[in-house]
Image (tube, rainbow, N blue to C red):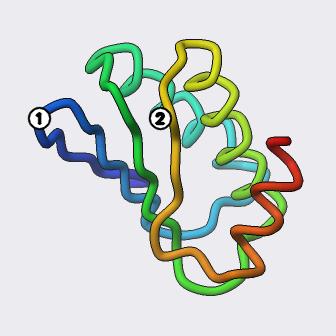
Amino acid sequence: MLTSHSVDGDALHVTLHHNVDVNTRAAAAVEIEALVHTHTPRRVTVQVPAGEPTPATLSVLVRAHRTCKSLDIPLSLTGATTATQRLFATNTA
């Protein structure tokens, strides 16, 4: 299982259980996109794995951000290191 999720009111909380690689990147991105489209939340949080993200993990997060942005849904990361937050911000600006 790549992700799990919960819905709390108008918020979708997604947990990415571990860093992904090139073989699981597309599946993780599609899972998150499907959750966003299914639940149509007002905000999304993604709990990221501890440590520095792999490039594939960062790609999944950026793709999820683009999906949410196109629907005017804010996406934020939880559990991310300062460096990961910076990488995410740089890649979603």
Residue at 69 percent across and 81 percent down: it is 82
Residue at 73 percent across and 42 percent down: it is 62
**Residue 24 higher or lower than 50, as above or below:** above
Which image quarter is the C terminus in?
A: top right
**Residue 83 higher or lower than 47, as above or below:** below
Which residue in the protein does label 2 denote? 32
**Residue 64 higher or lower than 86, as above or below:** above
* 14 horizontally vs 86: left or right: left
Which residue in the protein does label 1 denote? 9
The tag earlier along the polypeptide, 1 or 2, is 1
Q: Position of residue 36 (x, y in %)?
A: 40, 24
Would you identify the image quadrant in which residue 8 lies? top left
* 20 horizontally vs 14: left or right: right
The amino acid type, in three-letter code, at marker 1 is: Gly
Give neighbour class at mark 1: few <14, some 14-19, many 20+ (Cα, 10 Å).
Answer: few
Q: Are marks 1 and 2 in contact (CB under 8 Å)?
A: no
Residue that extends furthest to the left in the rendered view of this protein: 9
Q: Position of residue 77 (x, y in %)?
A: 52, 59
Which image quarter is the N terminus in?
A: bottom left
Q: Position of residue 13 (x, y in %)?
A: 30, 48
Residue at 70 percent across and 34 percent down: it is 63
Q: CA distance from mark 1 to mark 2?
A: 18 Å
Give neighbour class at mark 2: few <14, some 14-19, many 20+ (Cα, 10 Å).
Answer: many
The amino acid type, in three-letter code, at marker 2 is: Ile
* 93 horizontally vs 72: left or right: right
Q: Which mark is residue 82?
A: none
**Residue 67 higher or lower than 71, as above or below:** below
Residue that extends furthest to the bottom in the rendered view of this protein: 51
Q: Work out whether residue 67 or residue 17 is closer to the camera in this orientation and state it.
A: 67
Residue at 57 percent across and 37 percent down: it is 27
